Image (cartoon, rainbow, N blue to C red):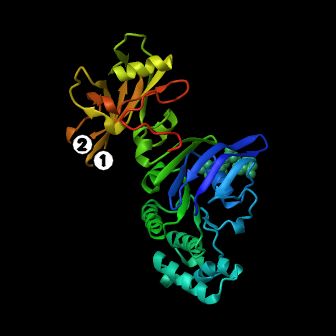
Amino acid sequence: MATVTFDHVYKRYGDVTAVSDLNLEIGDGEFMVLVGPSGCGKTTSLRMIAGLEEISEGQLRIGDKVVNDVAPKDRDIAMVFQSYALYPHMSVRDNLAFGLKLRKVPKSDIDKRISEAAGILQLEKLLDRKPKELSGGQRQRVALGRAIVREPSVFLMDEPLSNLDAKLRVQTRAEIARLHQRLGTTMVYVTHDQVEAMTMGQRIAVMSDGLLQQVGTPQQLYDHPLNRFVAGFIGSPSMNFIETDAPRDGTMELSTGDFHFPLSDNFRDALRKDAASRVVVGVRPEHLELGDVAGTTASIQGTADVVEYLGNEELLHVTTGGREIVAIVDSSHRVRPGDVVQLRVPADKVHLFNAETGASLVRTGDTAPTAAG
Ligand SMILES: Nc1ncnc2c1ncn2[C@@H]1O[C@H](COP(=O)(O)OP(=O)(O)OP(=O)(O)O)[C@@H](O)[C@H]1O
Ligand SMILES: [Mg+2]
């Protein structure tokens, strides 16, 4: 069984706490993505699974076995690095074979595994070339191949696509997803790119500043972010945030400038319980709709300063009360720069956060996610 479990794991470098109290269970055969901004502790977490970083506190288990003190070579994992780390003087074939020879795998076995991996990754015609005779995407496939031939019980990948251009990145993304479907091996994949995380992960763990913020399926994170950080990090363009005073008891509406949001019982209850003095309303750009503002929905009025035409849609940068709101609307509306627009938001698409703690006050929808996913 190849589950990976972080149990109250810390990693400290002197005064720096790179990873703090990490609790995360990665299922057998699961594709888990660790995502977050630079320096949040993704690589450190991955390297602890690989055994390349010592664990300062807590327990790391692979399957049922505590591996804190198990050497990297005895962990049955294979890691793909951002830099590929291929041997430049060796052919593709020898690069693939190298780790297996070190492990004294019989020659016939090595040949079989290389031909299988080459088949999966379409490297058959490249086996006799040196890395410098390959494109970036082909080198990346060799790096993946070297991990595959090991037949590990867990794959670790640290930003393996970041050296590829945009088009190749999309292609290789799909290749890795296909690879996972085919092999069914547990994979832990690190990226700072939320699009990569959303498209590839079966579940996503969002980190910030060494702290795990939320774990869930892409849809759970998108629909029910537990805090303002996750809400702003997941989704593109980012969620709009509007900060305002919390309403006093009895007020039926949140409003600031040309933004109005009638409060349902549900929201009024949440506000009463939380007792926040300032709140942040969150609305995703794609949930704003152009049109007449009816009295019962949340609405924003403003001036569309910039209109970016995207074909089927257009992106509006709307200024209202000194702040900018981004909206994505159907391009058939043909908004012109300088137009005054009215935008409404379905009540169930509005998020509300405590301005100080960032915690979500109301979980819209019917399923309340848990921090453990
Ligand atoms: N050997 C080290 N000594 C001291 N601090 C370190 C060391 N390695 C990492 N750190 C610190 O630990 C924190 C987490 O680093 P880590 O490399 O895990 O970030 P990351 O999420 O992978 O970022 P990136 O997206 O930039 O790769 C950072 O603040 C980093 O400066
Ligand atoms: Mg990193």
- Residue bearing the label numbered 1: 310
Q: Residue at x 74, y 64 (%)?
A: 71
For disc 2, the neighbor class at 10 Å (few under 14, some 14 to 19, many from 20) is some
Q: Quadrant of residue 21?
A: top right
Q: Residue at x 58, y 76 (%)?
A: 149
Whether ligand 1 has any atom under 8 Å from the Cβ at mark 1 is answered as: no
Tell me, yes or no, whether the two marked residues, 2 and 1, touch with CB atoms within 8 Å.
Answer: yes
Judged left or right of residue 373, residue 131 is: right
- Amino acid type, label 2: Ser
SS at mark 1? loop
Seen from the viewer's position, the closer of residues 227 and 368 is 368
Q: Is residue 256 visible?
A: no
SS at mark 2? helix
User: Rounded to the nearest whole Å, what is the CA distance between mark 2 and mark 1?
Assistant: 8 Å
Q: Residue at x 42, y 43 (%)?
A: 220
Q: Residue at x 50, y 69 (%)?
A: 137
> Relative to 18, is 268 above or below?
above
Seen from the viewer's position, the closer of residues 120 and 215 is 215
Question: Which mark, by number, is residue 250?
Answer: none
| x, y percent for residue 179 | 47, 68
- Amino acid type, label 1: Leu
Q: Is residue 118 visible?
A: yes
**Which residue is situated farthest in the right direction here?**
14
Whether ligand 1 has any atom under 8 Å from the Cβ at mark 2 is answered as: no
For disc 1, the neighbor class at 10 Å (few under 14, some 14 to 19, many from 20) is few
- Residue bearing the label numbered 2: 331
